[in-house]
Amino acid sequence: MQKLPYRAIVSDMDGTLLNGEHVVGDFTAQTLERLYDSKVDIVLATGRNYFDVSSILKKTKVKEAVLITSNGAQAHNLQGELLLNNSLPEEIAYQVMNLPFDDTRVCVNSYQADGWFINKDIPELYKYHKDSGFVYDVVDFKQHHGRDTEKVFFIARTPADLVELEHQLRDRFGAQTSITYSTPTCLEVMNKNVSKATALAQVVQARDYGLQDCIAFGDGMNDVEMLSEVGKGCIMGNADPRLIKNCPQLETIGRNTDEAVATYLRTVFGIY
């Protein structure tokens, strides 16, 4: 049997594996199925929630995968078994949810247990979840709770709208949390030491290979550690410019709208 160039492929979702319609394209689905049939491990590493991601992959013929979700706060297998969990402390989560900000330009969200909560109705967010049907509940966060919080995240109209909020978060909670951007307009807060890289390292501990045997793809600042620590990290052509600047040693490939991850994988693994 021909030796595999990598034992696992690890991919971010939005802006990376998903196409311009925020779904897995047919070419990508067929590529993942071919890799799975070749005994390559499939790992999805995303800021999304498990319930959102699992339904997306179940539309392919891939029967086994690891889903690292909420930027590494949790990992499950495709059957729903929880592999790791690292939630925010309840009181810190509640305080972060209730930080002051301009709610005409920023909204606050949380992923907690099996729910997505938001402070106001924003129908344009539905387009990112049409494949899974995962939807939010509108709540008053002052009357809400901080239990089982995977992450709290703030979505803004422009990157400038998050600058002051990021300063507040780092000043008050920087020593107790992990703070990153999944897109230039989405600022995310998880428990201390949570990242896609730390979750991936824990996952591969149970395998007969290491991080150097993984190839990974990403497009956001929440992918920096993961892309830097695997054997081969690839940055999307449509990535946050800060990611390219932070990781100049990594190769930049094509765009998610062209299903560039699948094209690249077919070349690397010799799938024709």
Image (tube, grey):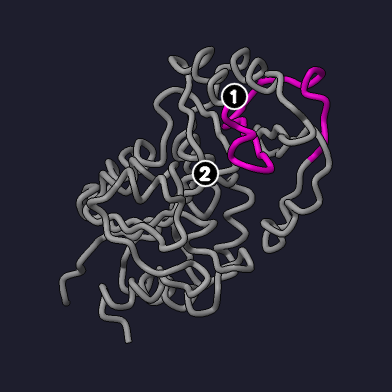
At a point 60% along the width and 42% down the height, the residue shown is 185
At a point 68% along the width and 23% down the height, the residue shown is 97
| Left or right: residue 8 compared with residue 80 | left
Residue 23 at x, y percent in the picture: 60, 66
Residue 245 at x, y percent in the picture: 34, 47
Which three-letter amino acid code belongs to the residue tagged 1? Glu
| Left or right: residue 20 compared with residue 209 | right
* SS class, disc 2: strand
**Residue 67 position (above or below residue 191):** below
- In which image quadrant can residue 272 be found? bottom left
| Residue at mark 1 | 164
| Residue at mark 2 | 182
At a point 26% along the width and 80% down the height, the residue shown is 270
151 magenta-colored: yes
Which quadrant does the N terminus fall into? bottom left
Furthest-front residue in this view: 160
Residue 239 at x, y percent in the picture: 45, 55
